[in-house]
Amino acid sequence: MSKHKMLSARAIAAEVSAGRLSAKDALKLGNEAIAKYESKLHIFASRPKKLSPSKGPLAGVAVGVKDIFDTANLPTGYNSKIYEKHKPAANASLVTMLENAGATIAGKTVTTEFAWFSPGKTRNPHNPAHTPGGSSSGSAAGVAAGFFPAAIGSQTGGSVIRPAAFCGVAGYKPSFRLFPTVGMKTFSWSLDTAGFFAASVADVAFVAGECSGRDLAVNERSKTPPRFGLYKSAIDDMMDPDMAQALGHIVKRARAWGASVQTVREPKLLTNARLAHAPLQDFEACLALADEYTRHKDKLSKPLRDHLKASQSITPEQYDAARRTANKARKACQKLFEKCDVLVLPSAPGAAPKGLKSTGNSVFNRLWTLMGLPCVNVPGLTNEDGLPLGIQVIAPFGQDKRALQAAHWLEEMIRKDQS
């Protein structure tokens, strides 16, 4: 069990709205945890000198912002030597949406270099010897450590769902293009998706809904169990024993809780599409970071420099073929949900790996980022060492509320089972 106490965005907003807590005092709720653990966990890339309250449905809610989103009042460095002390002239659209809803930016959170592979300095609050995941490392770990009740990040491969799973928080990767990426550093424009972190699924749905004006909030009174599809794929053997056992346990318990669980076998089109993710992403990354590679090559980390050089061998024809494969697979995705409401599968191969040289494997996430489907990490399970294990819930394109509602139901059942 983690020694950190997470903050609830919904509870804070409700207390502020009812007048039982001032927005100013609400913004101080993470101060004790920050003072005690920031020097050990390294969540922040930068912080404002003070947090100023605002008005709106998210008044009193402090939000961590991954340091690939532009902020006018804080440096935006993308964890790159090229952009040290870089100060954008304007906020990213999603940052302004949060502020317009009353949220206050708690600070910029550590990311991997350009939200790619090379790890940042953030550590996992559950065990600092283990990775927090990436690339949204500081955002997920900051929520888990109780520094702030909510955060935003991004996913190109598995950079929302995987760190959420490793840190034991709710992570929500919306349907592609549901939230703007304007003012967010691009790595792959066909894949980059802004996402959210919070203590629970209900919290993450609340923050995403209030900042966007969309109906995403979960219905906490609904007891209707979802129809789950247990997704059987070509990579299931990559689950470690803990993850396989946890998924099997969830399926068994879901049926006992009244949910139907049907097996959904991966069609060949989607198996092929999984292989299309890399050439599509890397071709676009070469173009997105062309100037950095051309003019500032010496300031890129060696792994990224080598990766971009190798990716230059991807031809436009190979890129176009990958796009065609992805488009065919997206159409095939519709049939996955003929007999179920949502799919259920691992968020990661297992718990957060030991060591800080890697942020873990995104193999269970890349396909769904490529498909653009809404994904939610459901927290609540752990292995014998107390490290979180994440279960991923996926809904059809555009059915984000369905994904969030099903994930909330599953999270509540897990909680009741453990009480």
Image (tube, rainbow, N blue to C red):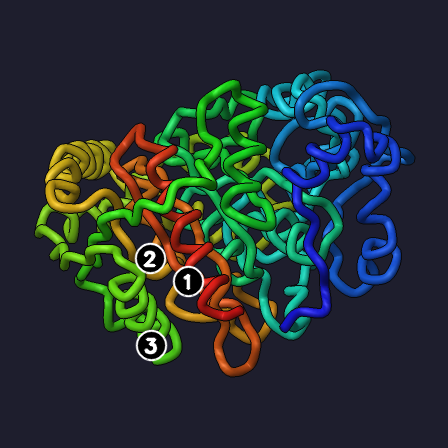
Which residue is drawn at the image coordinates 78% and 30% (left, top)? 74
Q: Give the Cα separation between the discs numbered 1 and 2.
A: 8 Å
Q: In this view, does 343 lie to the left or right of 378?
A: left
Q: Which of marks 1 and 2 is in front?
A: 2
Say if residue 96 shows up in the picture.
yes
Q: In the drawing, what numbered circle is on residue 364?
A: 2
Q: Which of marks 3 and 1 is in front?
A: 3
Q: In the drawing, what numbered circle is on residue 245?
A: 3
- Three-letter code, disc 2: Phe
- Three-letter code, disc 1: Asn
Q: Give the Cα separation between the discs numbered 2 and 3.
A: 16 Å
Residue 130 x/y as whole percent:
60, 71
- Three-letter code, disc 3: Gln
Which residue is drawn at the image coordinates 72% and 59% (left, top)? 5
Q: Which of marks 2 and 3 is in front?
A: 3
**What crowding class fits label 3: few (fewer than 14 Cα within 10 Å), some (14-19), or many (20 or more)?**
few
Q: Do the residues labelled 1 and 2 touch (CB within 8 Å)?
A: yes
Q: Is residue 242 left or right of residue 143?
A: left
The one of 174 and 76 positioned closer to us in this rendering: 174
For the residue labelled by badge 3, is the local secondary structure a helix, a strand or a loop?
helix
For the residue labelled by badge 1, is the local secondary structure a helix, a strand or a loop?
loop
Which residue is drawn at the image coordinates 55% and 33% (left, top)? 206
Q: In the drawing, what numbered circle is on residue 361?
A: 1
For the residue labelled by badge 2, is the local secondary structure a helix, a strand or a loop?
loop
Q: Is residue 166 above or below residue 248?
A: above
Q: Quadrant of the N terminus?
A: bottom right
**What crowding class fits label 2: few (fewer than 14 Cα within 10 Å), some (14-19), or many (20 or more)?**
many
Q: Are marks 2 and 3 in contact (CB under 8 Å)?
A: no
Say if residue 302 shows up in the picture.
no
